[in-house]
Image (cartoon, grey):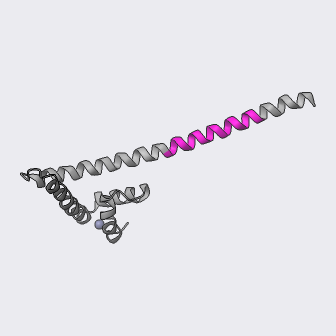
């Protein structure tokens, strides 16, 4: 992923509308590209500051807290990716087990039936 693609995803990251694959590539890029990380941080801080204004919370040392919040948000996103991937693997595994069980059942049924034919 290049910087232009990553910058285009910043607002979608904030809106949580990136697909798992996009999110993964975005996080990977942001982790290794300081200018995109700063871009994300700026958007994130502005957004969070507006949320805080809406909630009429105190602004003391808010910016420092917000940087910490972004780190947490990124960690949360990585956990989300891991969880989704695990779900996909488990779903695939369940599907394979189901198919294998069906095949075993039919093989058994055919064998039993053939004794009567
Ligand atoms: Zn970049």
Quadrant holding the N terminus:
bottom left
Residue in front for this viewpoint, 87 or 27? 87
Residue 97 appears in which quarter of the rendering? top right
Query: Is 49 on the left-hand or right-hand side of 106?
Result: left
Q: Residue furthest right?
A: 117
Q: Position of residue 8 (x, y in %)?
A: 33, 69
The C terminus sits in image quarter: top right
Q: Position of residue 9 (x, y in %)?
A: 34, 65
- Residue extending farthest left: 60
Towards the viewer: 51 or 67:
51
Instruction: Give the residue drawn at x 27%, y 63%.
Output: 33
Which residue is rendered at x = 34% and y = 62% of the image?
12
Ligand 1 lies in quarter: bottom left
**Depth order, front residue of 34/41:** 41
Left or right of 33, for residue 55: left
Q: Which residues are magenta?
A: 88-106
Quadrant location of residue 46? bottom left
The residue at 38%/57% (across/down) is: 23
What secondary structure is the magenta-colored segment mainly?
A: helix
The correct choice, above or below, for 43 with respect to 85 in the image is below
């Amino acid at each position: 992923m290049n910087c232009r693609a990553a910058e285009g995803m910043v607002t979608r990251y904030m809106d949580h509308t990136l697909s798992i694959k996009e999110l993964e590539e975005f996080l990977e890029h942001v982790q290794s590209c300081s200018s995109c990380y700063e871009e994300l941080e700026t958007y994130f801080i502005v957004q969070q500051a507006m949320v805080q204004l809406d909630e009429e919370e105190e602004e003391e040392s808010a910016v420092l807290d917000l940087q910490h919040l972004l780190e947490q948000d990124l960690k949360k996103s990585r956990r989300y990716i891991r969880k989704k991937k695990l779900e996909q693997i488990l779903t695939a595994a369940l599907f394979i087990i189901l198919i294998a069980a069906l095949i075993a059942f039919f093989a058994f049924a055919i064998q039993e039936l053939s004794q009567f034919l």
